[in-house]
Image (spheres, rainbow, N blue to C red):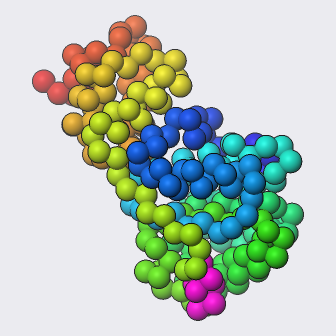
Amino acid sequence: MQQLPLGVRLRERATFSNFVVTAAPEAIRRLQTLAVSPGGMIWLWGPAGTGKTHLLQAVCAAAPQRVRALYLPLADLALTAVDLLDGADQLDILCLDDVQQSVGSRDFERAVFTAYRELEERGASLVVSADRPPAALTWALADIGSRLGASEVFQIQYLDENGQCEALRRHATGRGLDLPLETARYLCTRLPRDLSHLIEVLEEIDEASLTAQRRLTIPFMREVLGES
């Protein structure tokens, strides 16, 4: 992908096409527009496992070559993110994931404030994800908190069971797997609602099925999950 700092990789299958739209239809429509025609500031919030990382990476994946996009996972980059933000004046879209990890650091907030102003002046975009809305975070610098509080704010919620099954089956299809509906429902009813965890389990089961040369049936799932 166009703009990625060393050591950061986008998930190959994090696209808008395999995100279940019922989770946040207005947010997805807005992000799809922004990816090809940058402009505006967007804040996505919700608990872990609701697909915020997927959406930020989907923005970068959907951006055409002429649009310079950068994705930064703050939970992984920690303090090095401050240095990476220094190049915001060269970007059309800056995506900051898990911003709650760094809020409270004056150095980080100053860097975000500078990036925000540079992006805003050029009509570029900042897309932020967090586990809470801007007003619920404890900012060290009130100015950046109030600026981001004026962004377009979208809440991303957990999918219901049907939505999770659909998301899981789309992910399986992207991996070239045949995941029957009843098998997907079996997983969704027995595991936490965190979609990222469900996908991790599916990938582990996929590897086990390749080793055992078994199809993804419910009996096979029971064996892999250690259920009687």
Q: Is residue 101 visible?
A: no
The residue under the point 39% across, 60% down is 47
Instruction: Pick the quarter of the image with the C terminus.
Output: top left
Q: Is residue 186 above or below residue 15?
A: above
Q: Is residue 144 magenta-colored?
A: yes
Residue 213: x %, y % from top left: 40, 8
Depth order, front residue of 188/101 = 188
Direction from residue 118 to residue 176 in the image, left or right: left
Q: Is residue 69 magenta-colored?
A: no
The residue under the point 57% across, 50% down is 29
Q: In which quarter of the image is residue 151?
A: bottom right
Residue 2: x %, y % from top left: 80, 46
Direction from residue 187 to residue 13 in the image, left or right: right
The residue under the point 38% across, 25% down is 205
Depth order, front residue of 36/143 = 36
Instruction: Pick the quarter of the image with the N terminus.
Output: top right
Boundaries of the magenta span: 142-148
Depth order, front residue of 112/166 = 166
